[in-house]
Amino acid sequence: MNYAVSPWAIAIFCTFVVAVLAISYHFARSAKSASGFYTAGGNIHWSVNGIAFAGDYLSAASFLGICGMIAFSGYDGFLYSVGYLAGWVVAMFVVAEPIKRLGKYTFTDALNAKFNSRGIQLAAAISTLLVSIFYLIPQMVGAGSLVTPLLGLPHEFGVIMVGTLVIIIVATAGMASTTYVQFLKGGLLLIFSLVLVFLVMSRGVSTKPDQGGDVPFRDFQTVKAASWDGQTVVLADSGYSVAGVFPENLGKLVFVKLVKNGQSSFWKLNPAEMLLEETQTVAVRPDGSKLYNGETKDKGKFYQVGHMSRIVKNGQEVQKSGTTDFFSFIKTIKDGTVVRWLKFAGLKDGDDKVTVYYQQPIEGKELLKPGVKFKVDSARGATTANKIDFISLMIALFFGTAALPHVLIRYYTVPNPASARKSTIVAIAAIGLFYLLTLYMGLGAMVNGVLDLTNDNMSAPLLAKSFGVTVFAIISALAFATVLGTVSGLIIASSGAVAHDLADKFFKVKMDEKRKVLWGKLSAVGVGIIAMVLGILFKGMNVSYLVGWAFAVAASANLPTIAMILFWPKTTSRGVLASILVGLGSALGMILLSQETFNEVYHIPHVKSLIPFNNPAIVSVPLSFLTLVIVSLLTQRQEAALQARNAEQLKKA
Amino acid sequence: MHEPSSNWTKDHAASIKRVLGLWFVTLYTIVYAGFVVINVVSPSFMAVDVGSLNVAIVYGFLLIIFAIFLAAIYNHICTHAEEVMTTLRSGDETEALKEGRS
């Protein structure tokens, strides 16, 4: 669709940017020491820290990604919400207080507190950097794709703007400004998500949604076919002529190109009812230009979609549901029929590559159970490998959260372990509430005629737009802030890994407090620039799986070590080192050799991967645990000697 | 070795909190694992109506609300344990101090 830039949206966005810069300026003085820079002096109140946790954690993947996934695939998108939240339970009950007690500035500090091993220092720092960078890329790409509809600026501009702003936030005041930016964003995101959900409820559902009267409902047409013999179509309507027939997917899908008054369009054949159903298309021409339903984008001929074709209320079919509540909204969708839009990419029409979007009505009750996106239902052809893949994803989400470096460093910003615990409760409550709302925002977008078929990430902002440009401007500015908050946290974590873990602790670069802060700031600038370059390089790529990589790597490399150090006294430094390396290596190795990576990154879908699933956690997490146990048991004697030597050195020092 | 990020007193309730944390995380893991297993073993069960909603949505919502509920209980017990243990310890120390003086 063509996005019109609103001056109001620009004004609200600029106000937010000014507020962020003012916060950074205000806290600039607090970042004069390493403690001030990395942990805001450990003086943040637990309630502020809890909301900042939410601001940090509710990234573009959560806000834009999950809402978009629910809007396009129903309940399966909500499974991410459940998995992301469940991970916080591990953080709360296992990690929060001990991490605070053991660590100083970074996750590596806590891991190495007992051992003082240079190997662990290096391996944990590398793991932190890898996880942070996997997480950074989708955020930066998300920033780029948000800026186009919001400000009408190119992708590269969005990436550079986010990068520059984050560098300013982090380099001026480190964790203090980052915390308050995340607090502001987390709080506002919750409030306006609630507002959006209440607006959705009060509008209710209609079979002809018109965005509150602003955008007329587009009724897609059908044309009757007189005959279909498997190769040629004869039309009952003489107004159209057939310009081509395209059987795809071994004949399971048949698209027909029709021409009327010199205008061509694609239609999907429904052989059961002998109907041709209107589709929407994006054609890429040999010169790289794109046509949307046969026209350039600015003509506005590519329509927003998403509606219910059947609404049942009190046993009667109705056109509108009227105002709904948390229960009746779901019931309306469950008892009715939703028109989904599916995508077929790769139709060749002469030299043009055409992506066709076509309608597929589906019962609401089917959409509100698992199996539309994830292959978990044997009745829909799911294999054992598909099911293992799903279980593996849910394991990564469960164990990954408590091992994400940018989440862990937030435990050092509060004064004591009890505050760490309390801030986690606030985080769970805030994040839990938000994830409950994602189901309503996603389903609201699905049935309100707001979906942009070319960009599922814009579902929530476009839902907001259907309630007026002010709501859209606020939600879009918040979506942008979502990226800003998460990227700031990731840059602080990466900067800690480079300046504190590697330069200070591993390479033993001599530095006083001032130089430590300078190293931290320079590292933040360096990582920020790398993030900008990656954000531009990965433009247009499907990068959502990178967040999955980050969770899988964190769950495999970091969590087993944290958990075992805390709960198994026989853990040795060599066991920890081996566990990090095996977890990191196995998770990364399996990801790089998975079919999804072959398809999306290497672009060799014809090559069959030997790894039967895309998510490695089901293998790499137990493997990492097992490695730690075996190596620790084998190195008990060496560990005792090592600890004695360390104690000796400490005495001499 | 690294020094801690701040100075705080010894946590006398640490072992209670550790055991409680382990029990709670185990309990939640079982409920979460049940959710994942039903999703792959019997997706059709997830479509069974529960009032206006269905099993899938009710179970998903309950997992989120259960996490908040467990976290609140955990914090309540931990805070109470910290207070009790601190009072007991300070009582012991005062007693020991008195005995020392006499």
Image (cartoon, grey):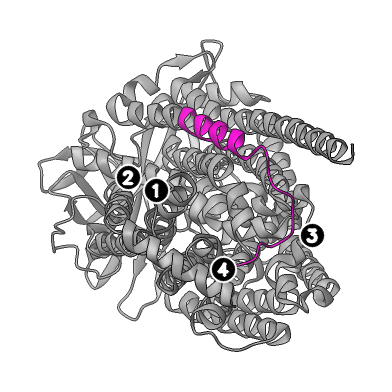
Please state which amino acid type lies under the numbered disc 4: Met
Q: In the rendered structure, does residue A630 fall within the stretch colored magenta?
A: no
**Residue marked by disc 2:** A392
**Left or right for A319, reference A138:** right
Please state which amino acid type lies under the numbered disc 3: Asn
**Residue marked by disc 3:** A43
Q: Secondary structure at mark 3?
A: loop
Discs 3 and 1 carry the same chain letter: yes
Image spot of residue A529 (x, y percent): 55, 83
Q: CA distance from mark 2 to mark 1?
A: 6 Å
Residue nearest the viewer, comparing A194 with A36: A36
The answer to whether residue A219 is visible is: no
Q: CA distance from mark 3 to mark 4?
A: 23 Å
Q: CA distance from mark 4 to mark 1?
A: 31 Å
Give the numbered dot on residue A396.
1
Q: Residue A378, located in which quarter of the rendered image?
A: top left
Q: Residue A123, located in which quarter of the rendered image?
A: bottom left
Q: CA distance from mark 3 to mark 1?
A: 32 Å
**Residue marked by disc 4:** B1
Mark 2 or 4: in front is 4
**Which chain is indicated by disc 2?**
A
Mark 3 or 1: in front is 3
Magenta part of the chain: B1-27
